[in-house]
Structure formats: C-alpha cells, structure tokens
Amino acid sequence: MTLDDWRQAARFNPVASNAYHLFTRANPTVSQPLVLNNAANLQQSNFDSTKRTVFLVHGWRNSASSEVNSVLVPALLAAADLNVIVVDWSAGSSSINYRLVLLNTISSGRAVAQFIQWLNQVSGSSTSQIHLVGHGFGGHKVGIIGRNLGGSVNYITGLNPALIGWVTNIYRFQPNDGVYTEVIHSNYGVYGYIAELAHVDFYPNGGISMPGCDSNECDNARSYFYFAESVMSGGFTGRQCVNYAAAVIGMCDALPGRLQMGGLEPKTGRTGVFLLETNASPPFSQG
C-alpha cells in the first residue's frame, strides 16, 4: 500500500455512501431504499422481520445494477418469500486501483455490519435469519461483515471470491465468519481464490474453466449463475475430495461424501471440499 492509497481510503465514508436496496415479492423489480438510522423509512418499507433476509454484495467495479444482482434478485424471490437487500458500495469499489478497493472493502464491510446491527435492533430480526452472499471482492467482504457480527450470521456464501490482493490478506474469507460458510470456486488462479476458504468449498468442473465459457469473465460469472439455479431447483450434487488439489485434477472418487451446492438452506455442521460437473448451458445442473 502507498501513502496515497491510505489517504484516498481515509476519504471514503462507507457509513454515509453505502446504499441498501430492498426487494421483496411486493416490489420485485423496483427497490425501496433503506437508510441507516431512519426507523420511519424502514417501517414504511416492505421489510418483514419475520422473514429471512439475504444481503447481496457486489465486487470490484460493480454496482447495484450489475449482472450479479439482476441474476440473483429474481431467482431468490422466485424461490422463497424473502427480504433481499442489495448493498451498493460502488463509491468504494469503482476505482481501478485495486489496493484502494482492498482498503475500501474492509471499511465498507464494517459499515454493512453496523447497518445490520441497526436493522436487527429496530426491526426485531436477528442474525439467525440472515444470509450473506458476495461475489468477487464481495466474496471476501461478506466474510468481513460476518466477522464484525461475531460469526453469528446463519449462512454466508462466497461466489468466486477474488484472488488479487487476498492471498496473504488477513481479512480474506475465513470458515468461522458465519455459523455455516460456503464458497463456489469457478475461476481459481485468475479472478478467483485458489485454496479452501470456508466450511465447505465447491469446485465445479475443477474450479477454473467452465463448460460453455470462452473467457475468464464468463467463468467468473458462472458462480452466481450456478448459485441462482441452485436456489431455484436444487441439483448440483458434489462428491467429496481429500483437498482442493484433488478437486482441481478431478480425482475425487475415493470418498463417499455427497453434498448439494448452494441453495437457501445452510448445511450446518458439514465441512470439506467437493467436486461436481455442470452442463455448458442452462440448466447447468447434472443433478
């Protein structure tokens, strides 16, 4: 990190600039903004504290309108009657300077945790009802959010968490950031992190090159397309591997363990690395 990176990061105020967009089945396409410390705004919204809440966190140089959200919001609402809150931290993620975005990811993650604490306090909801889902840099940020909530979030999903800047970063996704944590690796070594990060790590097609893709960008995006399909229809049965190296080379036939990838329900208590194969086009699941 340079001194200029730290100076620019100090000017970023995520408590003020993070935006929170609520989608529900009553407003599936036009969001309702939720504002920290504005209880009247929350009470007038469609937020229902008796339902589960999924937070979606985008990655580097993305925003609330990025594809990850346009894919996941309708899939989640079709699958269950949920509160879906899209976190827009584009004020901190839009720089081409990844070192600055790394710093902003950490501070913005703390600010999201602060928002969740306020939301729970005002509405009566709890972290046992929360599912954090993040892509790319957001895939590590959901871990940071969970850590700042004491590891009490029920379910955290990292979708191809980023590689660049995170290999030796102490703030990267960690297994105990939530009660149950899961990562889907779809482009390891390029856009995505290589090794295990969560309680359970899935390596579809070995984790780097996805059938039907001809670019790293496509491979990177497959993580959220697979997750969207998993919440809609299940499928994606993984077979257990000794470690991620075995998953990468496809040598995972010795162990008996099987586990479904993704979905809305946490597989609390399960651990390990799993390999599965997908189709080149939707439906991606082979069962």
Image (cartoon, rainbow, N blue to C red):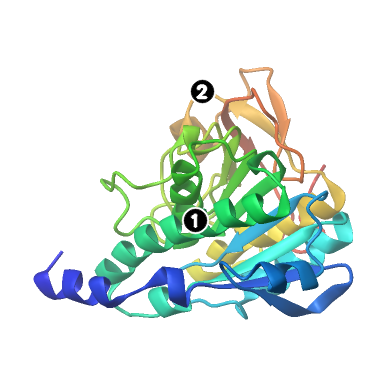
Question: In screen coordinates, is 249 left or right of 99?
Answer: right
Q: Dot 2 lies on which element? A: loop
The C terminus lies in which quarter of the figure?
A: top right
59 and 147: which is toward the camera:
147
**Apparent side of residue 78 relative to residue 160 in the rendered image (left or right):** right
Residue designated by label 2: 242
Residue 61 image position (x, y, % from top left): 44, 77
Instruction: Tell me: residue 59, above or below residue 228.
Output: below
Residue at x 80%, y 79% (from the top left corner)? 29
Q: How crowded is mark 1: few (under 14 residues within 10 Å), some or many (20 or more)?
A: some
The relative height of residue 148 versus residue 213 in the rendered view (above or below) is above
At x 23% / y 77%, what residue is drawn?
A: 8
For the residue carrying disc 2, how many other residues have a C-alpha within 10 Å: few (<14), some (14-19), or many (20+)?
Answer: some
Q: Measure the C-alpha gap from mark 2 to mark 1.
A: 38 Å
Q: In this view, does 95 lie to the left or right of 25?
A: left
**In the foreground, 273 or 270:** 270
Residue furthest toward the front? Answer: 40
Q: Quadrant of residue 4?
A: bottom left
| Residue at which label 1 appears | 114
